[in-house]
Image: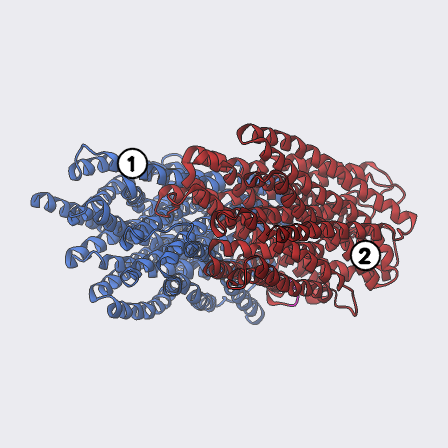
Chain colours: A red, B blue
Amino acid sequence: MTTNMDYISLLIWGAAGAAVLYGLALIWWVLRLPTGSEKMMEIASAIQQGAAAYLVRQYKVVAVVAAIIAFLISQFLDLNSALGFLVGAVASALAGLIGMLVAVRANIRCTEAAKNGLPRAFEVAYKGGTVTGFLVVGLALAAVYGFYQYTHDVNALVSLGFGASLISVFARLGGGIYTKGADVGTDMVGKVEAGIPEDDPRNPGVIADLVGDNVGDDAGMAADVFETYVVTAVAAILLGQLYAFPGQPQLAINYPLSLMAGAIFASIAGSLFVKLKGRSIMGTLYKGLVISTAIAVLVFFAVTRLLIGSENLSYFYSTLLGLLVTAGMMVITEYYTGTKYDPVKHIAHASQTGHGTNVIAGLAVSLQSTFAPIILISAATFFAFNLAGLYGIALAVVAMLSLAGIVVAIDAFGPITDNAGGIAEMSGLPKKVRDVTDPLDAVGNTTKAVTKGYAIASAGLAALVLFAVYSQSLGADVVFSLSEPNVLIGLFIGGALPYLFASFAMEAVGKAGGAVVEEVRRQFRTIKGIMTGEAKPDYAACVSIVTQAAQREMLVPTLIPILAPIVVALFLGPLALGGMLIGLITTGLFVAISMTTGGAAWDNAKKYIEAGNLGGKGSFAHQAAVTGDTVGDPYKDTAGPAINPMIKVANIVALLLVPFLK
Amino acid sequence: MTTNMDYISLLIWGAAGAAVLYGLALIWWVLRLPTGSEKMMEIASAIQQGAAAYLVRQYKVVAVVAAIIAFLISQFLDLNSALGFLVGAVASALAGLIGMLVAVRANIRCTEAAKNGLPRAFEVAYKGGTVTGFLVVGLALAAVYGFYQYTHDVNALVSLGFGASLISVFARLGGGIYTKGADVGTDMVGKVEAGIPEDDPRNPGVIADLVGDNVGDDAGMAADVFETYVVTAVAAILLGQLYAFPGQPQLAINYPLSLMAGAIFASIAGSLFVKLKGRSIMGTLYKGLVISTAIAVLVFFAVTRLLIGSENLSYFYSTLLGLLVTAGMMVITEYYTGTKYDPVKHIAHASQTGHGTNVIAGLAVSLQSTFAPIILISAATFFAFNLAGLYGIALAVVAMLSLAGIVVAIDAFGPITDNAGGIAEMSGLPKKVRDVTDPLDAVGNTTKAVTKGYAIASAGLAALVLFAVYSQSLGADVVFSLSEPNVLIGLFIGGALPYLFASFAMEAVGKAGGAVVEEVRRQFRTIKGIMTGEAKPDYAACVSIVTQAAQREMLVPTLIPILAPIVVALFLGPLALGGMLIGLITTGLFVAISMTTGGAAWDNAKKYIEAGNLGGKGSFAHQAAVTGDTVGDPYKDTAGPAINPMIKVANIVALLLVPFLK
């Protein structure tokens, strides 16, 4: 057994190390690439400074909050837990930080590479995004396994998850407010009032907008998936100890982490196949994912046979369900957000009769897009439970998250290509460069939507597993019966939280956007020669304003998922808290899916018209579609995705409260 | 005891009779009023014909569906149940039918009365609306009590509720599609394309639009509240027999129905105080409600002492909670939809920066507006349960519904004043007439929103009570535990249904509106002289098109709440069905509240600007506000309110399935 254990330890550390090394190798590769002209450098450096300014300010706020929470944990729980909390927070912050610093350096190199054609530009963007993906899984796996090896304290792992959660909720919400505040504000004055195109260097908000893409889709997504990865691993370990492998604590740790470790090797292997031949960018990205998945299946089978034995393959089948959910969510999201399919075309057609009908059609699609994902998640839950009980559900989520490295890579590819196009536009590069970056950007929009579907489904399922741990930890005599009014009340209160939170997030974008509008107007008014290109706008002022607005607006809503469980537990007790968690997961899933999918559908309906359909750019339909896109922006990039960490945070906080509730 | 019983029988029959007689007396009073000029008569008669055409077609469809369901009930349950189903359906249809026929006759008389000033016009509109209110409560009480006296079969009462449900879901959804299809379609061609004002006689869709107001806010609301009234009474009776008064079946019937009967007298008394002095229309309406409530409190106390005894006043306190929820919902809804308060002003201000920001602000308000109502409903549930268990919750809802007579009167007042203004506009009456009808119409908009809040809260709570009956009927060994995956899956599926249903409803309005647009364009194109007023448009063609569209589009979505419980029970069993009911109630409440409140807030933000604020009519802000209003239309008048019957229908169907699930 000891030898076996050593091999497993080697596998897990090896995988975490391989992921981090792979990430570092890619950083080395990216940074050696040429950076282009001085003009391009100037713009890229403004983006880099803006990103750094945002990160510094964000982490300052987070550090204060984290210090307070760590202190409280050390007082109310124990030192191990406080340490775990800090490890989780630091590891998550590190993954986001490095990933983003690389992304804002890969962008200009992607623009430069675009001069040599599509395949080369694609390679730069993809490799730049892959850094984030593999740092996420590598650091997450190392944090969970390393911390357990050091402390052998499984309860403190929950605090580690909470540390990751804290970073996640701040990154998703702060990043979402930043990116859409900058986007909406910049567009409203630039496109609508001044009549200048997107990414025009005369617009003072344009750098903030380019920074925002990295902040939202790179750092935000990374922190979100990091959190899901960690809490899924922790929940699977706890459920394994309580339920699947009682009396075998080491097996409860080794089995899920070995699955995740094996899948890292599978993802690296799949990632090596991502090489653009021909023009199907999306197909190339999916090829990497499909190969990773296929190898992961073999790895899951091998790990299960090795650790569990061959007589019981139900665990293996449960992991397959997780992979099916990943594939299913991607197919469904692509259907609802792709320009080839009916929903987006329907919104585009509705734009012909005006702003109102565009919005009505978009809302209808947004509402409808929740149905198939919920049925998929329900079906997976049903079959996983019937295969292997609650632990089967946990394994399905473990399998989903195990491929996070390559999934995040596909997502983080988006902001790099978006920035690359922006840099090309701003530095006045020839049209052939944009002809390379534009299709990359379009694919980036789809991958961002599709990976958001994955992030939500995995967050929802991970939260369900956390709830299962909460429920099991309280003991068999605590039954969350729907006939118990406290459970029902908890369910209602929990259900209300995503609505309240989303409302705050939407408002925050409005306020941040309004601040940008005022600043851009001020610069247009006071800096002579901006519009003729003789004077340079003050980009840094806009960056600073959005950064401040994002920090200010994110504080109150982030407290909701942290304080609500404590308040409910205090006044209504553990039954109401359980109801609250499920209510939060339920409406949270609907709000998050409807917002992210609906928002992306609105975005692509505009793009469909801009591609020359239904009158094309500048037509009446296009104006209406721009309205839909504006509405969709905070939907898909702020409120919707920020629901994910909210769902998980509340569940993690509830787990931390268990010792006091017993 | 027998004497006591006779008195109670007298009280209940007396109240039902008084309500119906009061309604009939008001009909007699309204019909005797002068109807104005021939021009006015012509318009009013077109509205009357349109309303009749809609009702005939609607009831034809309903009759076929009802006949099939009645047959199925007679086969699978028993003859009593089939009979109960028909009684419920016919009584509900009758209340809606008579109420609406009176409303489309009160409208012209209100216009005529407006020539003599505000108080007289107010009186006509209020009395016209009161007909619907008191027919609803009178016929509902008579149906429940009379049917029980005839059959003494308490289970068949559930089918009676189902009959009312069927009418309700058709009336709410069909009416909602009709009213907003006509409204959106007529406005889009008239206001936007042809540039003619609202209610302009040259617009071929204008009669359909005026008919629509009656169809939606009169017949739809009447059927919805009728249903809630009946199912609440039935659920309270069943819960009384199972839980509060085991072995005393007659007391279980008499107590809730006596409360409801007493409140009818209180409502009639309060209604007599509704006389406009000064200019506070809203204040006058609320005065009637407050007096009714005060008298109802005394009546509830007396009835409780008489039937239950003075030692246990917890039942009485539970009824007070119901009255508090009614008041609370009204205050909250008025805050979120009134032009005096921040939310509406916020949407209006956001309109200054464009269509997109108007919609974002509206959606944020819409999301936020769910929070306070849910906390109110949760608090009422908590306290009622702690006072008197599940039966306490039932009594709170009984108390809420007991005042339905005067609440519906306040709501049904709206379409009459709206129509009165339309008739004045179309027949070219002097401005002083519109100066009377316009403020009435504005108040009507607020009362429509406020009573919708009441309708949703009562529907949600009634559905919770139905769930309690479902749960109790299955026996104590069936526990709907949230740790049971089937319950969770049911919860998710149930949660998905309001989203799917609302999506269908939004789309249906789009389709119906599109059909109207085409027809109006066709008439503008082919009938020469329409725009100069020389030729009359073909109003009936538009009426017929919306009527058909409404019938066609409502069929599939109405099947959702009827078939979903059967399918889930069949494939996943009673636990999943229980989860489904709660999931449906939970997300249903959020979707319905956010849509109805958000929609009304958008509407009033437009009105706030039209009142001369932020640039007034024709300004850029106004254009953006018109977009918000267009989006809010299907939100507040189609999808949102149609969720109410959906929630109740599914719960009633589940109750009918209990014998097969055991």
The numbered disc on residue B387 is 1
A601, above or below A213, in the image: below
Amino acid type at image mark 1:
Leu
Position in image of residue A425 (x %, y %): 83, 53
Q: Work out whether residue B123 or residue B250 is closer to the camera in this orientation and state it.
A: B250
Is residue B120 in the magenta section?
no
Disc 2 is placed on an element classified as helix
Q: Residue at x 65, y 38 (%)?
A: A87
Q: How many C-alpha atoms fall within 10 Å of the one at disc 2: few (<14), some, or many (≥20)?
A: many
The numbered disc on residue A124 is 2
Q: Chain of mark 2?
A: A
Image: magenta residue range: A336-340
Disc 1 is placed on an element classified as helix
The numbered disc on residue A278 is none
Position in image of residue A192 (x %, y %): 73, 49
- Between disc 1 and disc 2, the foreground one is 2
Q: How many C-alpha atoms fall within 10 Å of the one at disc 1: few (<14), some, or many (≥20)?
A: some
Give the mark count: 2
Secondary structure, magenta segment, majority class: loop
Position in image of residue A139 (x %, y %): 69, 46
- Most distant residue in the front direction: A2
Q: What is the quadrant of residue A363 in the picture? A: bottom right
Residue A160 appears in the picture as rendered: yes
